[in-house]
Each structure stands twice: as structure tokens, then as C-alpha cells.
Amino acid sequence: MKFFIHYLCLLCASTTLLQAAPPNVLLIVSEDNGPELGCYGDPYALTPNLDQLASQGVRFNRAFVPQAGCSQSRASFLTGLYPHQHGQIGLATWGFRLYREDTPNLPRSLKAAGYRTGILGKLHINPESAFPFDFHEITGANFNRKQLGDYAKHAASFISASETPFFLSVNFPDAHDPWLRQVDGLPKSPQTGAEVKAMPYMGIDPPAMREMVADYYNSLARLDACVGDLLAALEKSGKASNTIVIYIGDHGADFLRGKRTCYEGGLRIPLLIRWPGKAKPQVREELVSTLDLMPTVIAACGAAPVADLPGLPLQPLLADEPAKWRTHLFAEYHTHAAASNYHPQRSVRTDRFKLIENLLPDMLNPDYADTIRKLETAAKKHGETDCDDYITKAIADAAPEVRTAYAVMEKPPRYELYDLQADPHEFHNLAAAAEHGATLGELTQALTQWRQNTHDPLLDAKNLTRLTAEVSAVKSKSEGKQLTWGYPDYFFGKEPATPTSPSKPSKKKKKKQP
């Protein structure tokens, strides 16, 4: 009897230790993917694996990124900071970079807590040395979608290499352009333009763009199949029951009024979190941000807290506990490549209203024409049209409120105010409406207060003028790569030692085995 009681005590102790084991973290990131998934109600999305993941965990219905650009968004969810706080205000491929290499980030914090850290796919942040991953495979963007099965294979190898807890970030190339109809038989049954329509926030749906839209959805279906293989590999490892799975898009789709804007089509993303035994399957309506991921993961993994992060840990929402949550959510935009996309903005939204402040009002937004030109070129490559201005004609033939919305986007005023309940696609700018004056004033004050609290360098008019000149002078990617950008210094009152000297070539890290 004593032996039996002793055995039960040992068994209970072992079970407690097993339950208390630090969770693994699998962070899955898609490219240019707004909430166009079946689980978000999109009628054209064929995403059964992601839909199942959503049913097993928490689907956040109103999740956003702080800037709708690849490098900017990725730097934000890995550091927990807004782009104006960490410095990656434009694409890494054009030389934009963090202010400081010692900026705290997820892989560094989790390594210090005893985790193995790995990444598959692109990091897309400068300098890469700031992120001390133990393991990095498929280091490029892989927009050609070569050997897509390797993502799951490398993940399986890393996951199973040790019993030490892991953090693995898997970054898939879909649904970034070029939107490829089928790769290696995926998707098995591609959709055509006759089966889909353009996302409603575009306000137009020209037939010449339908095949591109279909292939965007085909890219999402292919992505879904790859996510299914990845989750199957996790399940086969035996570690799924103690792994937090997080799925996000890095920002919205690269169509009109999406990527590279502060509109909902650019900022709103899917966010799914499955945490067995901790996250109650449910749908949440709170305003959440990818900035919330770093404090969430740090708390879940027992890592040392990082001071002054603007995000909030999501644990109360995952457990369906009462929580005092944010009432205002902030975002921003600076540039993407360089001069062709530069139009700095700041934005704030509440449950109902969205305010966008354009920091260079009444000036042409160069990304407007650049996006139209890009899509018209892509349509020709698809063989959909030989027309040079089918988008311009579609806008001219659209409803009056849609034409007005595109005119606002092309040459934005100081403020854009939208009632998201009555106007979810942001076609009616209410900033000049007298009946909304109080709302405009409240949101303007909230936006200014946030900018002051987060030490926004562009509050200083001299910094805005100097950044405008610096970005506008860069005309090519090669020029941007060779430039030592000055803003990481003069934003903080320092002069760069050699403002335009070529950067030293970075040494590529050797791949480490799991």
C-alpha cells in the first residue's frame, strides 16, 4: 500500500512537471494576406487547413499590423515596437534598417530563456545579425515557389532535433506577387476569373483584373496546403499538445487600397492562435495588433519582460477572461521602396471611427500611380488585356463615392475620417463634416498624444523635411542598398559620420544545424 501511494505521488509530480513544461511556439507568417480566408467568411477562399486551425483556437476578427509593408511589419512583430520606434521604416532590400542592432526582440529574449530559435523563409530586416536565430533555412523570399515541400521538411527536422523548447518562425512566400496559378500541382483545382470577384474595399471589379484576383486566391489555397503539411509535421513530432501555434499575415493584399496604405485593406490581417489547454476556441472582437505577440509569447514562455512595449499580452482574451482592453488602435506608414511609395501617414481607429493624418497633405501620393501601373502591367502578363489604362477607366466608370475615394487617395488632404460601421470600405471622408467635428477633434488629440508618448521622430518638422529629401533622392534599389541612411542618426539629433557612404557588405551567417 505504501508503495502504491508513493507511486501515485511520483506520477502526480511527473504530470505536474510535464504540464508546467515551457510551451513551444510555432509562428506561421504569410505574405500579403488580409483576412481573405474561409474562416473569416470570404466566399472565394478555399482554405480548409487554416479554417480547421481557427476552429481549434482563437480567431481574432479585428487584428491589425502597425504598418502595411513587409520589412516594417516583420520588424514590428519581432520587436514589439512601432516602425517609428525600431527604425525599419522601409524595405530592407532598399537599405532601410533598425536604429540599433541591440533592439530587444523575440529570438533574443527566448534564447536567453533557454529556447532553441529557428526561422524558415525570409527575415527581411536589417541588420540580420540583430536576430540571433540558431537555425535558418530557405533564407530568401522564394517568390518562384521552389521546393515548397522543404518548409515542412526543415520544420520537422528542427522540431524533432531536441527536447529543448523551441521558437520557430515559418515564413511562406504566398500570397505575394507574382500570383502563380499552380505550382507543383498546388492548388489541385485552381480557380479562374469567372469564379471570383475583387475584394470589396477596392470599389471596382474590372474583368481585366479577375484572373489576377483568382490567382491571388489560388496562392492562398496553395499556402493553405503548405500550412497543412507543416501542422501535420508538428503533430507527427508528438509536440503539438504543448505548442502555441500562431498564424498571421504580414499585411493586406497587394491590390488597390490595400498594401502600402493605412486603409483597412492594408492593415487588417488574419490572426489565429491555437494553444491546447490554454486558449478557449472562440472568436474575439477586440482591437488587437501584431505588437501584442511579443508580450504574449514572452509571458507564455517565462522569458524576462521587456520594458516599455506598446503591445498587450493576449492571455486574458485567449482564456475568455474579463479584461480591460484598448479602445484606440494606432498605425502608420512611411515608405516602402523609396520615392515611388513615400507618403508618410499616422492613423488611429476605435470601434467605430478611423482617422488618417497625412503628414504631407495636398501632395500627390506617388504610390497611387505606381500601384495602378504595376497592376496594369501584371494584367498584360496574365494575357487579360492589352489596355494601358483599364483601372483608370474602371475608376472613371465607378460610383461617385468610389471615384471620390480614389481622388482622396491620389492627393490626400490633411485628415481622412471614416465611420467604419456605416462605411466599412472607407469611401466617404467625413473630416470636413460639421456633425463629426467632435469625433475629429477627439481622434486628432488621441493621435497626437500617442505620437508624443511613443516619441515619433516625425513630430519634428525638420525631421520630416529631411526624411522627405533623403527618400526622394533615392531612385533605385541598388542605390538604396549602397546608401548609409542618415535618418537613424538625425532622428535623434546626431549627424551620421558619412551620410551617403556605401555600406560595408554584410557577411552571411553560416547555417547551423538544428
Image (cartoon, rainbow, N blue to C red):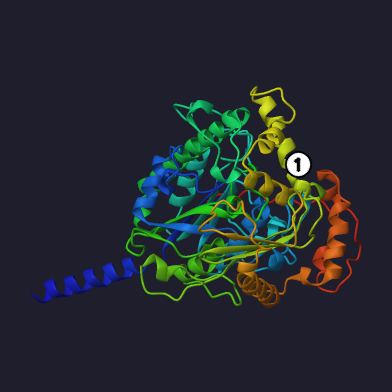
Q: Where does the image place residue 444, in percent across and percent down from the top left? A: 67, 71
Residue 318 position (above or below residue 38):
below
- Residue 331, by quadrant, is bottom right
SS label for mark 1? helix
Q: Left or right? Give the position of 325 relative to 283.
A: right
Q: Residues within 10 Å of mark 1 (few under 14, many from 20)?
A: few
Residue type beneath disc 1: Asp
Q: Nearer the viewer, residue 453 or 71?
A: 453
What's the residue at 75%, 51% (across, down)? Answer: 507
Front residue of this view, candidates 138 and 457: 457
- Taking the image as shown, residue 339 lies to the left or right of residue 368, namely right
Q: Give the residue at the far front of this rendering.
A: 434
Across and down, in percent, residue 5 comes to: 13, 75
Residue 224 against residue 249 in the figure, above or below: above
Quadrant in which the N terminus is drawn: bottom left
Which of the 4 image quarters holds residue 419? bottom right
Q: Is residue 160 visible?
A: yes
Q: Residue lying furthest left in this view?
A: 1
Which residue, given by chain and number where applicable, does mark 1 sit on? 370
User: In which quadrant of the rendered view does residue 74 lie?
Assistant: bottom right
